[in-house]
Image: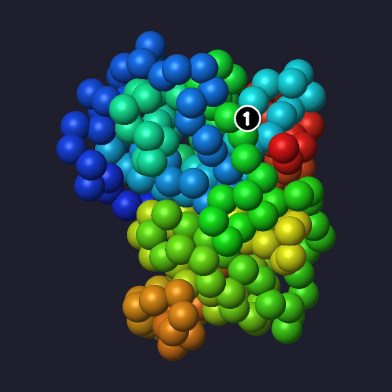
Amino acid sequence: MRFRGVAAVVAVIASVGAVVAGMAQAAPGSVVLGGSSGLVFDNNSACSLTAIGYDNANRLVGLTAGHCAPTGARLASEGAMEAGAVGVVAYSDNGEGLDYAVLQFDPAKVTPARVVGATTINGIGGQPGPGTTVCSNGRTSGPGCGVVWGTLDESVTINQACSKPGDSGGPVTVGDKLVGMNQGRLTGLAGIGFDLPCATAANPIHSPAFFAPIDIILAAVNATGGVGSGFRTF
């Protein structure tokens, strides 16, 4: 995955696969999910939800990083494991290319939310330029902000927000607009290795993080014409 120090984490919750297999346990609409919610998958990984909304077929869908889980993996809410599986990975590029995955949720088990903790997502924003302050939120680091340094290519924006294992897929926002998907932190560039992990979201002394602009990801999703095409935030 090029220079990427990706931010997925092996789930620390025991027997995740067995819990996720419980498809019939959730009461209708009992699991509330929104941007930055923690997700666990039946491959025993844990990541963060970018955003939740609907596609052009009015399916309840969401996004996360592709390296989190493969196509077909079932998923549960980290905050409501007792509910069992609440969705499935409809498509994943497995961390290759843009590094994204499309999730399809069971609308009988999931209630979408615009606000999760410090993060509010109320629509899609444009790509932030150098000097813009962006904010991220993930299941591991929680909320934090950092300045955009620039881009490595059209799909990689470098910024000084915190990114730890498990934060992958988390939303990157400017105000209440979703502008990107967190995908990890830099561990080297141009043959030079460096890796200074983030201690806390409030401490800016760490290796830069990187995210994919959300408009680039949504263009790729739309091009498939499948689940997630025409995504709009809740």
Residue named by callout 1: 61
Residue drawn 73% across the image and 59% down it: 176
**Residue type beneath disc 1:** Val
38, above or below 61, in the image: below
Looking at the rendered structure, the number of numbered marks drawn on it comes to 1
Residue drawn 31% across the image and 27% down it: 82
Q: Quadrant of the C terminus?
A: top right
102, above or below 58, in the image: below
Residue drawn 73% across the image and 28% down it: 55
Q: Position of residue 92 (x, y in %)?
A: 52, 35
- Is residue 11 in view? yes
Mark 1 Cα within 10 Å, few/some/many (few <14, many 20+)? many
- Is residue 181 in view? no
24, above or below 155, in the image: above
Q: Residue 90, located in which quarter of the rendered image? A: top right
Q: Is residue 125 left or right of residue 224?
A: right
197, above or below 66, in the image: below
Q: Is residue 229 left or right of residue 84?
A: right
**Badge 1 element:** strand
- Tell which of 80 and 161 is nearer to you: 80
Q: Position of residue 133 (x, y in %)?
A: 69, 77
Q: Is residue 159 left or right of residue 200?
A: right
Judged from this view, the residue extending furthest toward the left is 14
Q: Position of residue 87 (x, y in %)?
A: 48, 24
Q: Residue 207, located in which quarter of the rendered image? A: bottom left
Q: Quadrant of the N terminus?
A: bottom left
